[in-house]
Each structure stands twice: as C-alpha cells, then as structure tokens.
Image (cartoon, grey):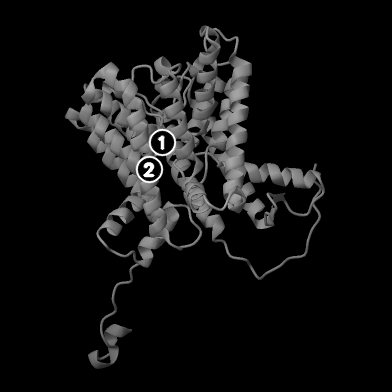
Amino acid sequence: MRQWLPGWLAGPPAQPRVVARPPAQVLSLLFLGLILAGTLLLKLPFATTAPISWLDALFTAASAVTVTGLTVLDPGTAFTHYGHVVLLLLIQLGALGIITFATLILSLLGQRLGLRQQLLLRDDLNQTSLGDLARLARLIAAVVLLMEAAGTLLLAFRFVPLLGWSEGLFQALFHAVSAFCNAGFSLLPDGLSGLGEDPLVSLAVSALIVVGGVGFNVLADLWQWRRSGFQRLSLHSHLTLAGTAMLLGAGFIGFLALEWSNPDTLGQYGSVFDRLLIAWLQAVTPRSAGFASVDTSRLEDGTTLLMIVLMFIGGGSTSAAGGIKVATFMVLIIATVAFARGRREPVAFGRSIEPTGVLKVLALTSVSMLVVLTGAFLLLVSQPLPFLDLLFEAVSAAATCGLSRGATGQLDSFGRLTLIVLMFIGRIGPLIFGVRLATVGATRIRYPYGRVYLG
C-alpha cells in the first residue's frame, strides 16, 4: 500500500533485500568456479600438445582442484609446460583452499577479516568456531611452504641428474606439491612405478604424504605442545596419530603378505629391501595420495579390497586428504568396543567421547557410504567393465585418492561425469557436512523413549 500513501507518510523507498548465501554454499561455488576456470585454461591451444575435448579438460581440472589424481590423459605428454604450471596451481589452490589463500594475502597486506570472511574461512578449514583463524591460516601456509620446499630439495637430488637443472627442479617441485597435497599427479610416463625402489624418492614422497594428510590441526597441536609432552595433545590429535600409525602398519603388513609372491607386483623384485620399500609406499598412498609404485590392476583381489577400505577411511581432518577421516574411523572402533564391554559412553586416552559425537560420526559414515554406493551403482549399470574395477574407481574418486585399476580411461562420457561429481562431493562434502554437524543446536523438545529390537 506504500504506493497509495503520500510521500511524506510513506517514507523513503524500500531498499531491495539482499539474501546472503550460507558460507558453505559460497565455498562450494568458489571451488566450482576454480574448476571451470581451470577447464578454460587447460583447453587453451598452447596448454596441450594436441587438441583435447572439453570433457577431458573438465575432468583433469576437477581432479586437480579436488586433489584426486584420476586422469583420462597422460599429464606428462598431453600438456605443455604451461599446462603443467596450470595443474600445479590448481592442485595448490585446491589443497590449500581458496579462502585460506585469500586470507594469507589479506594478512600480508595488513587487512583484518570481517565476519563474513571469517565464516567462510571457518568452513574452509573445517573449524567449529571462529577463534584465531588467521593465525591458523598463517601456520598452514608456513607448514605447506616448509614441507614442499624440503620435498623439492630432496627430490631434486634424484630428478636433476636425470633430467637436467631446469626440468629436474620443476619435476621435483611438481611431485613435492602433488605428494604433500595428496593429489597423486605425476608427470613421469609410468608415475612412480619406475622409481618405487629408489629409497630417496619413496621415503621423501611417503613422508610428504603422511605429513600432508595428518591434518593441520594435528600439526598445530604438535607444535603448540612440543615442550609439554605427548600426553598434553588433544583427543583429536591422539586419535588421528594413533589411527594413522595403525592404518599404515595394517596396510604395510597386509600388502606384504598378500602380494609377496605375486609375480606382477612384489614378486618381480628379487631384493627383499626393494619389496619392503615398495610395499611401504603402496601402504601410504591409499591415504588419499594416489601414487602407484606397482600396477594396481595386477593386485590380488584381497589386496584390492584392502586398498578400498584404506581409501574409504582416508587421512586426517583439515587436510587435503579425503575419505571419512581417521578420527571418524577411530571413534567408530572405540564406540563399538565400548558397546561390547557394556560401557555407557566411549572412552579413549583418558577422555570420554560424548554421545552426540558418536551420532555425528555415524551420520558422516552413512552419508559417505551412500555416496560411494550410488556412484558405484551408476557406473555398474552404465559401463561394461568388471565389478571390482568400477567399485575401486568409485571409492577412489569419492575419497579423492586417485588410485586406478585402469577403468577411468575406458569410461564413456556418463561414467566420467559420474566420477567428476564423486570427486567434487568427496572434496567439498566432508567440509560442509562436518561443519553442519558441529553446529547443530540442541532441541528443547523431548519425546518418550521407544524400544527398537536390534540384532
């Protein structure tokens, strides 16, 4: 009725209402925008050695931004040096996070973050409170630069003698960034298969993968309590470190036991040391790194299933690694043990885990399983390939791992689009879902308990 009132009574005209998007939605749009920008850059004529399709460019950009590592093209031969630099930047931005990177730039310029920017940064770092986010972002940048520089220096001792100073240094930098960001991209013709028995390469790459996949919260906790002893670490750090050690040990022993006599994998190496070295790297890489030191398609079925489980679990929270995360897996195990022992609440490292935390873990695991099973089903009904190969690719994409049994290159357009969606959900989903679960408020409405018969 404002238009019928006199001007002096109606007051100033109403301003258009601006609806702010939730930070998680903005974060998703930023990652999507980075993928589209990467697609355009990789489609440029001087980025490739031969023309590629838009779908191949989109798949490669999505794999780089989501730090997955699945490829439908050989990155080393399909792209020029310009294309390799684009891939490197996409991997770094995808792993470090667009908002984290922007925060660092603002901090260097002496600018303070507004509430809106802090909310975006909170979601990008998978935090539950605002706290001192800028300090955490600076710590992340320092760790990233330090580890990638150290990795580049170590790998340069191997790549420079083989490829010369210019190409050798770039290859060392690219593989150091790819390993620390858990991306799994390699510019070598056979990936790391030809260098798997090289102690320097295997140990340097595996160290970068472990440190990069343990999570920045854990690294910050270790730095803060470095003088106070291991017992002062948070429960999350305890669970992540203990779970990481357990999973690495199980993967290493399992891979050795199952592949020791396989002539297509470990059996082709005569030296026991070489077998141990390759088995170690292959136990580390399912944490979401994606490097393969042996032909994954030649693995025994039992080993393939073991790697599927390891990929599904993934690495640590607030890292570039995918999966349901190590802490989530540890809470599941601890809650199961507590139920078997008749305890009312799970206990670990002298601290109790609240029941709502267990419910959040169950929700996250259930949603992740639903995503993987849906993706695997779509691949199975549309692609004429073996069941185990397609399940492996679906888990690898959803867990942003990048390991492949060779099925990715054989998929049609629908199959490749399915993997793109799985990679995007695998990178963005846990961040958004985790923050959403952490910020769910308690309801004041209570209902009477009902009995459900289980088992």
| Residue 27 in the image, given as x and y percentages of width and height | 38, 52
Name the amino acid type tagged 2: Val
| Residue 118 in the image, given as x and y percentages of width and height | 39, 62
Q: Measured along the vertical axis of the image, is residue 14 above or below residue 249?
A: below
Q: Which of 240 and 411 is in front in this view?
A: 240
Residue 131 visible in the picture: yes
Left/right placement of residue 70 relative to residue 111 reads: right
* Residue 373 position by quadrant: top right
Residue at left 23%, top 20%?
Answer: 164
Residue at left 53%, top 6%?
Answer: 270
Q: Spatial distance from mark 2 to mark 1, Cα to Cα? A: 8 Å
Q: Name the residue under label 2.
A: 144
Residue 401 visible in the picture: no
Q: Which of 365 and 215 is in front in this view?
A: 215
Q: Measured along the vertical axis of the image, is residue 338 above or below residue 50?
A: below
Left/right placement of residue 192 relative to residue 166 reads: right
* Residue lying furthest front: 227
Residue at left 32%, top 35%?
Answer: 61
Q: Which of 67 and 376 is in front in this view?
A: 67
Q: Quadrant of the C terminus?
A: top right
Q: Mark 1 points at which residue?
A: 180
Residue at left 71%, top 47%?
Answer: 335
Q: Dots 2 and 1: beta carbons under 8 Å?
A: yes
Who comes first in sequence, dot 2 or dot 1? 2
Name the amino acid type tagged 1: Phe
Q: What element carries label 2?
A: helix
Q: Measured along the vertical axis of the image, is residue 103 above or below residue 167?
A: below
* Residue lying furthest left: 46
| Residue 321 in the image, given as x and y percentages of width and height | 47, 39
